[in-house]
Image (cartoon, helix red, strand yellow):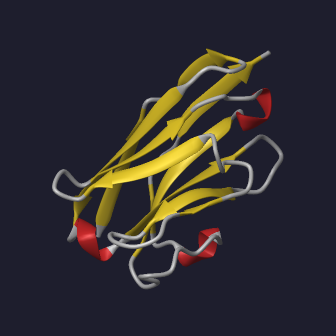
């Protein structure tokens, strides 16, 4: 079992930045691919960025060049640095853990075994 707790959400202006954090506890953190998803009202949950414990990270096209995922395996933390935020980035952001797909980074929510409760990000124009 893995417990995930997100933090760092908030409200920013168009063009602003935020850094999301996800703290993991439970099973060995290094075994998991860690990803960020987001869900806007009335929309499906979508992949944002993902990182295996070692190897190539992946980004959604909407995140490339603006968002950076990183992880600190020693601290069992994963981060999402978001810059140049746009109103369309407004969503609840979720941290998720996938225990079986290493070294791949799956982009479908059903591939993930554990989820955090989410943190709200609101970008106003």
Residue 21 locus on image (x, y percent): 39, 40
Residue sitting at 79 percent across and 35 percent down? 88
Vertical comparison of 116 with 84: above or below = below
Residue sitting at 46 percent across and 84 percent down? 101
In which quadrant of the rendered view does residue 60 lie? bottom right
Q: Quadrant of the C terminus?
A: top right
Looking at the image, can residue 28 be seen? yes
Of 55 and 51, the residue lying toward us: 55
Residue sitting at 33 percent across and 54 percent down? 71
Q: Residue furthest front?
A: 65
Residue 31 locus on image (x, y percent): 29, 76
Residue 58 locus on image (x, y percent): 56, 64
Of 67 and 65, the residue lying toward us: 65
Q: How many numbered marks have been drawn onto this rendered protein structure?
A: 0
Q: Is residue 11 left or right of residue 98?
A: right
In which quadrant of the rendered view does residue 122 lie? top right
Vertical comparison of 7 with 33: above or below = above
Q: Residue furthest left?
A: 74
Q: Is residue 9 left or right of residue 6?
A: right
Q: Is residue 121 left or right of residue 45?
A: left
Q: Quadrant of the N terminus?
A: bottom left
Residue 93 locus on image (x, y percent): 57, 43
Residue sitting at 46 percent across and 32 percent down? 19
Vertical comparison of 53 with 119: above or below = below
Looking at the image, can residue 9 be seen? no
């Amino acid at each position: 079992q893995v417990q995930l707790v997100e933090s760092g959400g908030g409200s920013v202006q168009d063009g602003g930045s935020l850094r999301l954090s996800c703290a993991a506890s439970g099973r060995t953190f290094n075994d998991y691919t860690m990803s960020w998803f987001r869900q806007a009202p009335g929309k499906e949950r979508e992949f944002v960025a993902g990182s295996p414990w070692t190897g190539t990270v992946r980004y959604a096209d909407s995140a490339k060049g603006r968002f950076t995922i990183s992880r600190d395996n020693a601290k069992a933390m994963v981060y999402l640095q978001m810059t140049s935020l746009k109103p369309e980035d407004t969503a609840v952001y979720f941290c998720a853990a996938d225990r079986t797909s290493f070294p791949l980074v799956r982009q479908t929510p059903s591939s993930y075994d554990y989820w955090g409760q989410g943190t709200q990000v609101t970008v106003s124009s």
